[in-house]
Amino acid sequence: MPNLSTHLLTVYNRVGLVPQIVVGLFAGCLLAWLWPEGAESVSLLGDLFVSGLKAVAPVLVLVLVTASLANHKRGQQTHIRPILFLYALGTLSSAAVAVIASTLFPTSLTLINQVNDVVPPSGVGSVLRTLLFNVVDNPVHALAEGNFIGILAWAIGLGIAFRHARESTRNLIADVSEGVTLIVRVVIRFAPLGIFGLVAGTLAKSGFSALAGYFQLLMVLVGSMLFMALVVNPLITFWQIRRNPYPLVLKCLRESGITAFFTRSSAANIPVNMQLCERLGLHKDTYSVSIPLGATINMGGAAITITVLTLAAAHTLGIAVDIPTAFLLSLLAAICACGASGVAGGSLLLIPLACSLFGISNDLAMQVVAVGFIIGVVQDSAETALNSSTDALFTAASCIARGDVSSEAVNA
C-alpha cells in the first residue's frame, strides 16, 4: 500500500499543474450537471482555495518586494519603466477596442434593476483621493484589507531603507522571502481542487440561465477581451520581442488566465503569476515589483467593462456618441480603471462616473451597474483573466526584449 500511494503521488506530481486544473474544471462541470446538491457542498473547496491565495498574497508582496529592493545590487537594472509603459499602452488599447466593438455592435439594455447598497465614486477626484489615501495607509491595515497600493508603498520604503542594513539583516529578509514563497507553492498545489470546487459551486448556484437575456452584451464584452488577448496583446508582444509571440501569449493565458478566470481576483492571482515568472526564468528583482504593481494598475479588462457598459447605456437612451467623445470616454475609462482596485465593487462602480460624461443620471447609471452584477459571473471572470495574464505577459516580453531571461522564456 505505501508503494502504491508513493507511485500515485509520483504520477500526480509528474502531470503538470495546468492539466490537473483542466481535469478539475471538467469534473466540476460534470458534478454540477449530475448532482447540483453535492456540487454546492464542494464549493467549500473553492472558497478555501481563494481565501488561501488572498491570505498569502499580501504577505508575499510585502516580503518579496522588500527583499528584492534590500538585496538589489547597485548598477543592476530592473527595467520597471518599460513594463509600466506596456501596462499603460495595453489599458488604453483595451478601451479603444471596446469603443470600436460597441460602435460595430450597439447594444440595448433593459434598465429595470436597482442597486441600492453600493455607492459609486462622485468623480475622478474621488478616485484619485482614494488612490492617494491608499498609498499612506497604515501597514497593518493595508495587509488586513488587501490594500496592495499601500502594501507596495511600504514594501518599497522598507526595501530602500534595508539596503543600508547589515548584511546579516538583508540575508534574514531574503530567507523570510524564500519561506513565504514555499508556503505559496504549497497553496498553489491545491489549485486543481480549488478550481473543481469553484466551478461546481458556481454552476450549481446560478448556472447560465440568467445570462440569456444579456447574450449580445456578453458577446461584446467577452469578444473585446478575447480580441485584446489574442490579437492586440500579441502585436504589442511582437513589437517587444521581434519573434512569434503566440507561444508566450498562450502560456500566460494557460497558466495565469485560467486560474484568474475562476478566482476572479487579480490580487489572489499574484502568487500564480510570481511562480509563472519564476518558471520562465525572469529576473526576480523585476517581476517581484512589476507583478503586484500590475495587479493594481494594469486594468485593461476593467477599461473594457466600463467603456462597453457606458456606451450600451448611451445607446439604450438614444444618446448619439461621436468618435471624439467616445475616445475621450476610453481615456477616462483607462485612467479610472487604474484606481478600480481602491474602490469597493471594482470596475462596475466606476460606470456612473463614465456615464456622467453623457449626462446620464446616477439612478439610471446604477441600473447599468445592476446589469453588470447580473452578468458578473462571466464578465468579472473574463476581465480578471485578461488583467492578470497580461501582467505576466508584459513582464516577460519586456525581460525577453532585453535578454534578461533564461532559455525557457525565450522558447516559451
Image: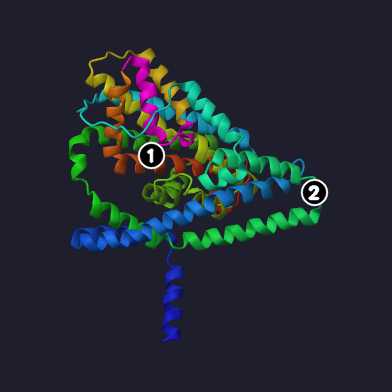
Tell me which secondary structure the magenta stretch mostly adopts: helix
Mark 2 lies on residue: 165
Which residue does the numbered mark 1 point to in the structure image? Answer: 383
Q: What's drawn in magenta, residue-wise?
A: 338-360
Image-based side of 240 in relation to 159, left or right = left
Residue 218 or residue 83, whichever sits in front: 218
| Label tally | 2
Residue 290, given in percent of the width and then of the height, sits at: 58, 41
Furthest residue toward front? 117
Rendered view: 14 above or below 160 = below
Disc 2 residue type (three-letter): Ala
Which badge, 2 or 1, comes first in the chain's sequence? 2
Residue 32 included in the magenta stretch of the image? no
Residue 196 picture location, percent across and down = 33, 60
Tell me the colour scheme of the image: rainbow
Query: Which of the 4 image quadrants contains residue 389?
Result: top left
- Kindly identify the amino acid type of the residue bearing the numbered disc 1: Glu
Residue at x 37% of width, y 50% of height: 262
Residue 361 vs 242, above or below: the answer is: above
State yes or no: residue 359 in magenta.
yes
